[in-house]
Image (cartoon, grey):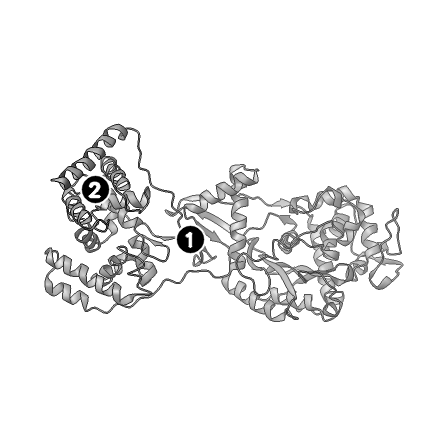
Amino acid sequence: MIIQKAIAAELTTADSLNEQMSNSIELSAPPINFTVVMTDHNGVIFAEEYVEWREPLRLASIPLFARQLFLESEDTGFFEHRGYDIAAIVRAFAVNSATDDLQQGASTITQQVVRMRLLSTEKTYERKVTELFYAAELEKQSTKDEILEMYLNEMYFGHQVYGIGAAATYYFSKPLQELNEAQLAFLAAIPNNPSLYDPLVRFNQTKKRQERLLAILARNSVITTIEAETYSNIPITLQLKKKENNFPAYSTYVLSELSELIAESEGLTDKTQIQLRTAEVLATGPIIETALDPHKQRQDERALSTLLQPKELQAGAAVIDNDTREIISLFAGKNYKKADFHRAFQAVRQPGSAIKPILVYAPFFESGSYTDNSPINSRNICIGTYCPTNVGGSVYGTTTVKEAFRHSHNTAAVRLLQSVGIDKAFEFIEPFQFKSVTQQDRNYTAALGGFAKGMTPLELAGAYSSFIDGRYSPVHAIRTVKDKEGNLLYKWDDKKIDIWSPATVNTMRDLLADVVRNGTGRGIPYTTAYTGAKTGTTDNYKDLWVGGLNDTYTTAVWVGYDKPQSMQRLSEQKIHLQLFSALLQD
């Protein structure tokens, strides 16, 4: 009698709460982070970003046998009750009262959904009453099929795996629909207690519970005893999903570029807004289609990592496809791991003479009827207190533009910048969007790469792509961003703009090719009919650069130490030319 009164009190409380709050509570789905998928230029997945592995399925696509496993073991009266099972509550209350301990469960599938979404798992009568109310309310707001679908997609299967669809691909590397009855029952054994029935740690206990579940189905006449025995005897072999995490140097950059794409597409400028919006998009589990060439990426990583000696020597590089103007390969540094410092797009370094083609010589040709044979005064020069010198202190007289470019005369470069005009020269490089180049860099030291901060290898490679045909559009790794259903969310809408005239392009390509044949780039092999490059060195050989292109690729590579030190010996060994040459290989 006492037990009956206590139960009645619980139900009365639940009904009272129900009447008071049914019009004000909306049991919406909790925020869920889905998997971000990245594909290469062939549409093959190469990276997955997730904390929780989820693959939600429609109820109709979940095998009936899988549904029956949970319905028969967890809630046989699911389609009859209104969210809670009074008979089960009576049994649980009687057991718990007799033992003075909350051990006996009485939760319906609806209550379990409520608990997963809204409540804690603490075993108190207060929480239980709240659970009863919410369960009744959920039954009003959703159909039975919808609740069952929620349950099957939100159950926890251990190892950050949520939902039976995700469990199938995680534990067996197969879609749920391809699993046999034994495998389905094995998965169904896990959620009751993911720690106790962790198949990676307690396989035998998971197998025993699988057999108990099959026995329940047989006892309830869902299957025969013979079928239960047959399914129990089918061997279970796990085949764990391997998280795709290839080419972290490329995938890390893709996520950075995604923020820029979202900001530009939605007109966002505030950093906090951009971060929040990017997080929202990533939580939906978009599919990011990229230009990655996995063969080239793998080849570049191996080649450069092998060449980078001694141990502490580092490099950053980017390779652009000349036809598509897309980033197909990125080198972030030797032994790069995800979240490490990314030297391709985060390493801002002074470019040395590698800046001369785009800031000095091409603007010079655009400013008048000059050719590579035009004379230029390479004698020493002082502009105010600024008196640049040539490498090794060499002094030259009047030379041709080609000779000054071939041997990278500093005095000639400063004179040419003076001739063009600092502001006019900088106008030419504005379309390249160097993020760290500021107004204070507009001085004559810039002719030799003397910027306050500088630029990244990716930025410089993008700028050199203008020498393909004189036109430029920002280079990108992302082709499209789509939602899980394949609907287009974002796509770059850049249009090529004219930077250099055809005459300037032809002259610059000749000059870059001459550097490879006769100048500071000697040693770079010809991998296609055309190869052109420009080297760059900063004071005391602390940075070594090469930027250039062949018929297939445009690239720029920086070589140095994270804590700058002299690399004169490495410069003499032409380590930067070796790295550049490797990047131009197919």
Q: Position of residue 434 (x, y in %)?
A: 66, 47
As drawn, 449 above or below 132: below
**Label 2 amino acid?**
Lys
Determine the residue positioned at 27% across, 44% down.
Answer: 124
Quarter of the image holding residue 10? top left
Q: Which residue is mark 2?
A: 144
Quarter of the image holding residue 214? bottom left
Q: Position of residue 142 (x, y in %)?
A: 24, 38
How would you rate the neighbour count of disc 2 (Cα within 10 Å): few for under 14, some for 14-19, many for 20 or more? some
Tag 1 secondary structure? loop
Mark sitting earlier along the chain (2/1): 1
Asked whether 483 or 566 is in front, the reply is: 566
The quadrant of the image that shows the C terminus is: bottom right
Asked whether 202 or 305 is in front, the reply is: 202
Q: Is residue 490 visible?
A: no
Q: Position of residue 85 (x, y in %)?
A: 17, 43
As drawn, 244 above or below 271: below
Residue 51's mark?
A: 1
Determine the residue positioned at 62% across, 44% down.
Answer: 497
Tag 2 secondary structure? helix
**Label 1 amino acid?**
Val
